[in-house]
Amino acid sequence: MGNRNKLIDGMLIGALVGAAISLLDKTTRETVIHNGKCVGGKIKYAVQHPQEIANEVKHRINIVKTTVDDVSKDIDYLRGKVEQLKEATPQVLEIVNETKDVIAKHLDSTEQKNKNLS
């Protein structure tokens, strides 16, 4: 148990030292201060207007639900089209083969007629 506490303590100390060193850079320091003010302002607004935040969350959840429903319907539609294609493919292949045979017979008979005329 003592080793675990030392590990956590060491990690926290390392994180604090790393953060302090990074704050020596002016740009980093200004960015951290700016972002902190923005986050603080957003938290203050959320605390002062909890119902508005709750309504926004509900609205976004409804948008996600609608999107998921639309995607689900699209997937079902595509699944149906794939099934139709699977069923139609053998029939189309059969028609193509029959057409090929008819054309081949016609070409053979035309070639025979041309040979006979020669």
Image: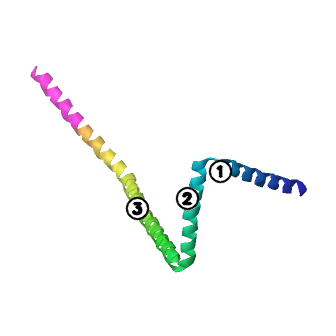
Q: Nearer the viewer, residue 32 or 105?
A: 32
Of the 4 image quadrants, the one containing the C terminus is: top left
* Residue 10 is inside the magenta segment: no
Read off the residue under disc 2: 34
Contact? badges 2 and 1 (CB < 8 Å): no
Contact? badges 3 and 1 (CB < 8 Å): no
Read off the residue under disc 3: 74
The reply, left or right, for residue 24 in relation to residue 65 is: right
Of the 4 image quadrants, the one containing the N terminus is: bottom right
- SS for dot 2: helix
- Dominant SS type (magenta): helix
Q: CA distance from mark 3 to mark 2?
A: 44 Å
Query: Closer to the observer: label 3 or label 2?
Result: 2
Query: Mark 2 packing: few (<14 Cα in 10 Å), some, or many (20+)?
Result: few
Query: Mark 3 packing: few (<14 Cα in 10 Å), some, or many (20+)?
Result: few
- SS for dot 3: helix
Read off the residue under disc 1: 23
Q: CA distance from mark 2 to mark 1?
A: 13 Å
What kind of residue is marked 2?
Answer: His
The relative height of residue 20 versus residue 74 in the rendered view (above or below) is: above
